[in-house]
Amino acid sequence: MSPPEAPRTHCWDDLIGPRERLVASRYGGDRTPGGRPALLLIDCYRKVFGDRRQPVEEAIDRFPATCGTAAWDALGPLETVLAAARDAGVPVLHTTGESRPQGRVGATTQRRRRPGEDEAAGYAFVEPLTPLPTESVVVKSRASAFFGTPLATWLRQLDIDTLVVAGESTSGCVRASVVDAYSLGFRVLVVEEAVFDRSELSHKVNLFDMHLKYAAVTHLDTVVEYLKGVGARSEGCS
């Protein structure tokens, strides 16, 4: 299988100076994805999208966890990678937050909650990305999709070797989940156009750092081709 990504520009290129490029030159290694991927969609719920496309500055009073227009910009790519995974017969897993008071071990981050904030409504999936009845949902109370959840066990039972990651936020739950996935021995692809953050700076810096250390940050079209290839091989073996 060919590497997931030929040399291309990335969203962080405008931030990276000579020192960062020198450091990056010392990283590398095999980034070839495996043949048994799963797609992990992280926290694609209403509280980060709000009820319409608005910049953070306009949405934050009503939706304190908003990612503003970045969420809406990523929605099309998220739908594309989800459709590609489903068409290829690749397992799809979704995460959402724990809204039950008796089930919480603490908030996923230290963001201050707004009085009267409806956690259950906020954790409802945004409609185009709603899980199918056959897709697993991981309910988590910390940033990582692996912390205190059965996710690693589910992936091992499915014999998964590669995790394709999309969702939000790049600097928070995505990064925490990617680090844990790498630490557990999975190969990780992060879909550059299908992850997002409320801070563009945090988004770019964390994608750059994850790409060096823990994952292959890969463009959407390359990921879709990879998933199609997996699906074609599966059909050939049936």
Image (cartoon, rainbow, N blue to C red):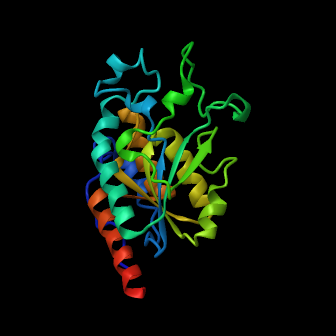
Closer to us: 83 or 4: 83
Residue 125, given in percent of the width and then of the height, sits at 45, 39
Residue 227, given in percent of the width and then of the height, sits at 36, 68
Image vertical order of residue 209 relative to residue 214, above or below: above
Image vertical order of residue 215 relative to residue 229, above or below: above
- Residue at screen point 38% across, 34% down: 201
Q: Quadrant of the C terminus?
A: bottom left
Q: Quadrant of the N terminus?
A: bottom left
Closer to us: 125 or 5: 125
**Quadrant of the image occupied by residue 101:** top right
**Quadrant of the image occupied by residue 102:** top right
Q: Residue furthest bottom?
A: 237
- Residue at screen point 41% across, 36% down: 197
**Quadrant of the image occupied by residue 86:** bottom left
Residue 78, given in percent of the width and then of the height, sits at 34, 49
- Residue at screen point 30% across, 24% down: 55
